[in-house]
Amino acid sequence: MKQTLTIPQKIRQLLLILVPILVAQITMFSMSFFDTVMSGQASTQDLAGVAIGSSIWVPISAGLGGICVAVTPIVAQLIGAKRKEDIAFKVNQGIYLALFISGLVIAVGAISLDSILDLMGLEDTVRRISHRYLLAIAFGIPALFLYQVLRSFIDALGKTRVTMLIALLSLPINVLLNYILIFGKFGFPSLGGVGAGVASAITYWCLALIALTLILRQKSFRTYHVFGRLFGLSIKEWKEQLKIGLPIGFAIFVETSIFAVVALLMSNFNTVTIAAHQVAMNFSTLLYMVPLSISSALTILVGFEVGAGRHKDARQYSYLGMGMSVGMAGICAIILLLFSEQVATLYSQEVAVIQMAQQFLIYALFFQLSDAIAAPIQGALRGYKDVNVTFITAFISYWLIGLPAGYYMASYTPIGAPGYWIGLIVALAVSAVGLSGRFLVVQRRYSS
């Protein structure tokens, strides 16, 4: 990364950071996409089992993994401030913290998973698939959280093409493993949806090992001496990272868990409804990779400019990212409007699932605008290390407004299952408004 003096230069640097992040995000999400699609080709029960398992795992992995994302603004600001010598210590402590969190997740999951699944009243086959899918995922948790820290370090240096290449390398590994383990190829047993969990766990380890190898071998990373010495564990540094990481992680958890809770509440409906909801939610999440990638790029660039004390440049990057995000949201909405049937048939061949998924995909149209506003603002605020209000806004909009509204419409009105989607749309809109207000406050503070 380097200082930019004009708007065209900023657009170019934003795109140089953004495009590899977008490719990497889509590639990483494609693993979940292929898990879902390939499990759906095995059977509707496998699709529903993976859907329930994912609805439990995704908010946990995203939320706790979000704590590791604290490394990005920390390192980005150190780079901007030209304090290169402090980076190795920060990254090492991030790794220690990630491994501690992963152990905690595995321990809590071992104690509570059966009880959670029992409360959901699932069909026996769907419950069994969900349980074994999550058990398989557990073996990859330490590797995934380790990779989150290593990726945050690499991205903060502006080397987003490296994480893009890592993701591109890992995707064919994941798809091949899915093919072998879900359908029982090359002499392996057919595991159905459970095979998708095994494939994901192995892929997580591949991600971590590839990233670790590159950091150790490439000269551009070796100069930071991340593994040049063994640092002792620092509780003080953990507290500093948690001060930034916990609000980020909680905000991500609050946002993703609301979608997971809706998926769990959908278990009160039949298997076709669960499968159709998962189809629509999975594809709308794929489209969300665009504003999410812009958010990640803004965290890096805004953090870099804030660390260097160039607050006008940080503000300009923020507005450029928001404008780009809204424009892309319009394109994504058109895609959903024109090709909803084709999208649904990617996931299932059952007519009932396809028809219901098309209805849910129409609601996903309205997700796009709110996400296009909220996600870039979140990224910019993280670049400023302003994270607490983001968490509070997410909690209020999703849990105190969106979920109750959705539950009421789904349970006490003729709308039924789509009522949950309307509640999510309301939550996203409220979140976008709240974050916009906070962003203006932060801008005024730095302008003064």
Image (cartoon, rainbow, N blue to C red):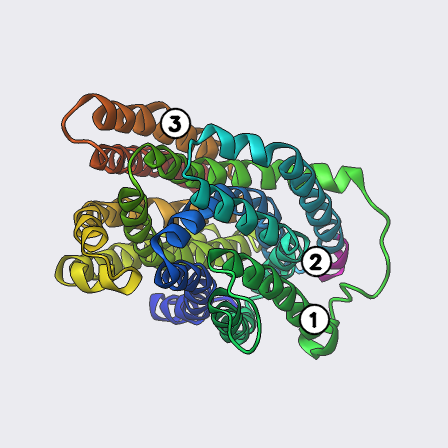
In the picture of the structure, the residue carrying the numbered disc 1 is: 215
The type of residue carrying mark 2 is Arg
Mark number displayed over residue 399: 3
Q: Quadrant of the N terminus?
A: bottom right
Give the amino acid at mark 1. Ile
Q: Residue at x 27, y 46 (%)?
A: 272
**Do residues under tags 2 and 3 come within 8 Å of each other at their CB atoms?**
no
Marks 2 and 3: which is nearer the front?
3
Quarter of the image for residue 27 reads: bottom left
- Give percent across and percent down for residue 29: 43, 60
Which numbered mark, 2 or 1, is in the foreground of this view? 1
Q: Which residues are magenta?
A: 84-89
The answer to whether residue 55 shows anywhere in this view is no
Q: Position of residue 110 (x, y in %)?
A: 66, 38
SS for dot 3: helix
Q: Quadrant of the C terminus?
A: top left
In-image side of 333 versus 34 (left or right)? left
Count the labels in the image.
3
Residue 256 belongs to the span the image colors magenta: no
Q: What amino acid does circle 3 point to?
A: Trp
Q: Residue at x 36, y 23 (%)?
A: 400
Name the residue rendered at 41%, 64% in the picture: 34
Q: CA distance from mark 2 to mark 3?
A: 40 Å
Residue at the spot of label 2: 83
Mark 2 or mark 1: whose residue is earlier in sequence: 2
